[in-house]
Amino acid sequence: MTPVTRFLKSRFPKLRPSPTSEALLWDRLDRCGIAFRAPMADLIDRYGAKPAIWSDQLDICILHDADPFIAGLAHPPAFQFSQDTDLLQPPSALFCAVQASPDHRINYAKAIAALKPHFGEGTVGTAANTASRSWQFGHATLSCTVWPPEAQSPARNTRHEIFPETRTEASIWMSPAYRTHPPPDLLAACACPALLPCPALPPKRLIAVGALTYDWPAEIEELPCGLYLSESGDSLLKQTRTGLIDILPRDWMRQIALARITGGRGGQEAIVTIEYSPSGQPDLPPQTMTLCEIYGDPNALDAFANDLAQRLDLPVDIYEGPQD
């Protein structure tokens, strides 16, 4: 798991898709001139980037010329990235903050008062060490969170040490969940694919829309949840959510990874993932798509991993041992 993935997973609540369309969030971003659909590489060329002082693995890009997303922000919306980030994709998340007051309650109240007229009441969080509110728009999310200093553990936080004002800030994170209709070369993959003999349904990601996600084409009947291989064999399809499809081109794939977890955190488990080149760029560090996982038996996916490797003509990398 990359630093960016860990950071995002700590920020977004696990929410069900909302019947409210993403348009409510997207329209606000458009009104503010926030280029959330543009590839990160283009945004970095336009706005520049600087190191995230609190982490030597991250850089940040601030969209300087955007109109205020809400009143009272310390800086315009920004995104962060690492050497593992696929910069040909739009930002998966944008962040900004209200931090003018040394009192977290004031920052939080100002942020919520500015967000509610645009997005409604939202859902109040229940975590013991934060005060938060979140909104769901289809597959897009928005959240506002403060970490009351008195409710935090005494563990060291480098960012708080370097920037004391962040101890009491109201942190605003949004995942626009922007995706497109499949381009013609991938649209054909959605017609008449073959269901793969996977012994369990593929797991859902915490964030519904990733770099490989497209809207399911309306002109084709949607597939049941599962893993599929296109009729031509040049694309792998992963269906886990209604209206969305993950499509991985064959020429991006590097290898199958089979993990036989024999103990440690979470107990015994078998996991099959596929490593691929982000946006088909072989010089970038590989990323992974989780295809299947089964708890209780570390050997439960051996046959599936070998069958898939033969179908795709890929090597299988096997790890066997405990999970940290």
Image: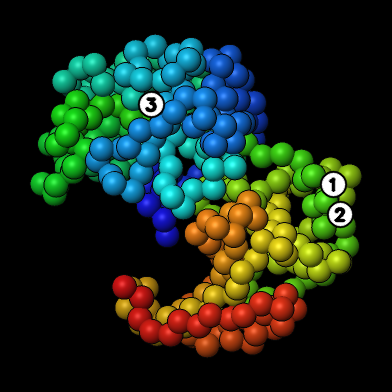
Question: Which of the labelled discs sits on residue 188, or is there none?
Answer: 2
Residue 299 vs 58, above or below: the answer is below
- Seen from the viewer's position, the closer of residues 226 and 286 is 286
Left or right: 324 in relation to 1:
left
Q: Earlier in the sequence, mark 3 or mark 1?
A: 3
Residue 137 placed where, x, y %?
Answer: 58, 32
- Seen from the viewer's position, the closer of residues 65 and 210 is 65
Q: Specify whether residue 188 is in view.
A: yes
Question: Which of the labelled discs sits on residue 97, or is there none?
Answer: none
Residue 274 placed where, x, y %?
Answer: 59, 69
Secondary element under disc 1, as helix, strand or loop, is helix
Left or right: 244 in relation to 51:
right
Residue 161 placed where, x, y %?
Answer: 14, 36
Which image quarter is the N terminus in? bottom left
Residue 150 placed where, x, y %?
Answer: 12, 36
Question: Which of the labelled discs sits on residue 96, or is there none?
Answer: 3
Which residue is depicted at the point 23% across and 30% down? Answer: 166
Which image quarter is the C terminus in? bottom left
Residue 81 vs 29, above or below: the answer is below
Which residue is depicted at the point 52% across and 88% down? Answer: 299
Estimate how packed mark 1 is, as few (under 14), some (14 to 19) or many (20 or more) residues with alpha carbons within 10 Å: few
Are circles 3 and 1 on residues that touch, CB within 8 Å? no
Residue under label 1: 184
Are circles 3 and 2 on residues that touch, CB within 8 Å? no
Whole-angstrom CA distance, mark 1 to mark 2, is: 7 Å
- Residue type (three-letter) at the residue carrying disc 1: Pro
- Residue type (three-letter) at the residue carrying disc 2: Ala
Mark 3 or 1, closer to the camera: 1
Residue 131 vs 190, above or below: the answer is above
Q: Earlier in the sequence, mark 3 or mark 2?
A: 3
- Residue type (three-letter) at the residue carrying disc 3: Cys
Are circles 1 and 2 on residues that touch, CB within 8 Å? yes
